[in-house]
Image (spheres, rainbow, N blue to C red):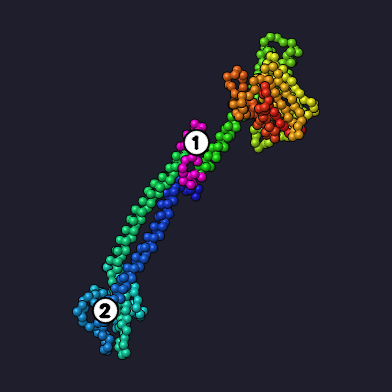
């Protein structure tokens, strides 16, 4: 059974057009077979009824030539006697009075006629005459009058012409069915092929759009209702795929951006260690810096990866603000002549986020402030009615008003040729991380000169 199913699966059509055409062909064949059987059965019944009507008509005509008034049944002579006597048996009661010249008293047709007369009443039966083929015989009793003898007329008719007509009609039906099935299959393949042409076009477009990262969508193309629904689903799928790819690129860029600083510290310490022999104390100090930078890289990876997992929200926690700000200020490379001041009135001030996440939120703001400051930056933290506020202020050129609307867009910089490094990813990352814990990062456009960025976080 399994081998047969496997063979049928291999032999069957493998395309949707072929399968639909096969289904249509099978359905049409089943319907045509039923119609052909019913039609030919009706035709054969109708032809038999015609033969019976002709036999009864001839029997009625012959009955008019029979005289039953005397002591014996007599057959009267008529002008069409030869026609009336052809294939006619006349009985007086059960006794054969007259028979066709082509038959004998004990021939097969005469025996059938005898049986019909013995039954009594009008009746018809089909017999096989080996010399002529099928023959239809019908008996018609002649109603006797008072004092008259009973008589019966049996007429016969060769059914070969009727059977030939029925066979011709059957053959014609089969030929017509074959032509109709061939036309049905061809038209179905043509119609299905035309109906599936938009699907093939959509497939080619999807392949092309995937290769060139196009922004085209199926919804912009006029399609039938079913294909429009399919196009809408594919558009949604494409949007989700693009969102995932965008998210992955953003995560990769953010990891590269954040890991660059501790990696630079490691490279610098290693270069410094290899430049000339160091004392044990200097070596231990270098190792401590490298270990601290490596731990910072690990913290950065864990923080960003945890935030990237949408199904796993950021775990709640608290962090003392002052130690985190001091550690950030100490770990950043400050340009020559630039000073940093940390202002926190409440040394026990806590934010409702983990220390690693607080570091990742404030670090890009401090990096930007040190990058653009002329001489001084200030980091001030205080408690507010809604939580904790951290202001990062520098005395640099500030944010151009024309660029303020694109300040938090990934990869955007006010002046890429200003001589400062950076990929335009720090501020978007800080805002995204702050929003993930219910906070916010914004630019204060009313501050001047310089720039001020405000971090709002829930209280610890």
Alpha carbon separation for disc pair 2 and 1: 89 Å
Residue at position x 47%, y 48% in the image:
4
Which residue is rendered at x = 70% and y = 29% of the image? 455
- Residue closer to the observer: 323 or 119: 323
* Image spot of residue 370 (x, y percent): 68, 20
At mark 2, the secondary structure is helix
Residue behind mark 2: 61
Comparing labels 2 and 1, the label whose residue is closer to the camera:
1
Q: Which range of residues does the magenta coloring cover?
A: 204-229
| Quadrant of the image occupied by residue 147 | bottom left
- Considering only order in the chain, which callout, 1 or 2, is on the residue closer to the N terminus? 2
Q: Residue at x 66, y 27 (%)?
A: 445
Residue at 30% over, 61% down = 168
Determine whether 414 is above or below 26 in the image.
above
Residue designated by label 1: 216
Task: Kindly tell me whether residue 363 is visible in this rendering.
Answer: no
Q: Nearer the viewer, residue 333 or 289?
A: 333
Q: Is residue 219 magenta?
A: yes
| x and y percentages locating residue 336 in the rendered image | 69, 14
Is residue 151 left or right of 377 when viewed as pictured? left
x, y percentage for residue 347? 80, 26
Q: Is residue 407 left or right of residue 341?
A: left
Quadrant in which the C terminus is drawn: top right
State left or right for residue 332 relative to residue 131.
right
- Can you see residue 66? yes
């Amino acid at each position: 059974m399994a081998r047969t199913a496997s063979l049928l699966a291999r032999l069957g059509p493998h395309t949707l057009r072929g399968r639909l055409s096969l289904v249509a062909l099978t359905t049409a064949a089943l319907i045509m077979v039923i119609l052909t059987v019913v039609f030919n059965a009706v035709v054969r019944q109708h032809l038999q009824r015609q033969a019976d009507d002709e036999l009864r008509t001839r029997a009625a005509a012959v009955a008019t030539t029979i005289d039953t008034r005397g002591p014996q049944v007599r057959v009267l002579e008529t002008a069409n006697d030869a026609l009336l006597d052809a294939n006619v048996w006349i009985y007086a009661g059960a006794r054969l009075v007259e028979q066709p010249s082509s038959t004998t008293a004990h021939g097969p047709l005469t025996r059938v006629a005898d049986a019909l007369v013995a039954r009594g009443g009008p009746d018809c039966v089909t017999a096989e005459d080996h010399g002529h083929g099928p023959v239809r015989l019908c008996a018609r009793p002649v109603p006797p009058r008072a004092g008259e003898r009973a008589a019966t007329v049996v007429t016969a008719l060769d059914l070969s012409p009727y059977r030939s007509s029925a066979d011709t009609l059957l053959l014609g039906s089969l030929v017509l069915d074959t032509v109709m099935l061939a036309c049905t299959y061809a038209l179905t393949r043509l119609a299905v092929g035309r109906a599936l042409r938009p699907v093939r076009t959509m497939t080619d477009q999807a392949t092309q759009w995937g290769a060139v990262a196009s922004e085209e969508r199926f919804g912009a193309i006029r399609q039938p209702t079913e294909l429009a629904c399919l196009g809408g689903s594919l558009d949604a799928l494409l949007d989700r795929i693009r969102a995932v790819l965008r998210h992955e690129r953003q995560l990769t860029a953010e990891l590269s951006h954040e890991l660059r600083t501790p990696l630079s510290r490691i490279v610098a310490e290693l270069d410094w260690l290899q430049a000339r022999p160091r004392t044990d104390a200097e070596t231990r100090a270098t190792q401590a810096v490298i270990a601290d930078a490596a731990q910072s890289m690990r913290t950065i990876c864990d923080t960003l990866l945890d935030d990237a997992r949408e199904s796993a929200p950021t775990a709640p926690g608290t962090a003392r603000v002052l130690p985190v700000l001091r550690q950030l200020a100490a770990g950043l490379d400050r340009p020559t002549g630039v000073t940093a001041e940390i202002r926190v009135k409440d040394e026990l001030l806590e934010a409702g986020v983990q220390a690693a996440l607080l570091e990742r939120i404030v670090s890009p703001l401090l990096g930007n402030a040190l990058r653009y400051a002329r001489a001084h930056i200030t980091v001030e933290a205080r408690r507010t009615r809604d939580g904790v506020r951290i202001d990062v202020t520098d005395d640099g050129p500030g944010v151009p008003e024309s660029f303020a609307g694109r300040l938090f867009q990934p990869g955007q910089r006010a002046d890429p040729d200003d001589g400062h490094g950076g990929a335009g990813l720090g501020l978007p990352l800080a805002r995204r991380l702050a929003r993930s814990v219910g906070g916010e990062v914004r630019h204060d456009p009313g501050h001047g000169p310089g720039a001020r960025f405000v971090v709002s976080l829930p209280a610890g």
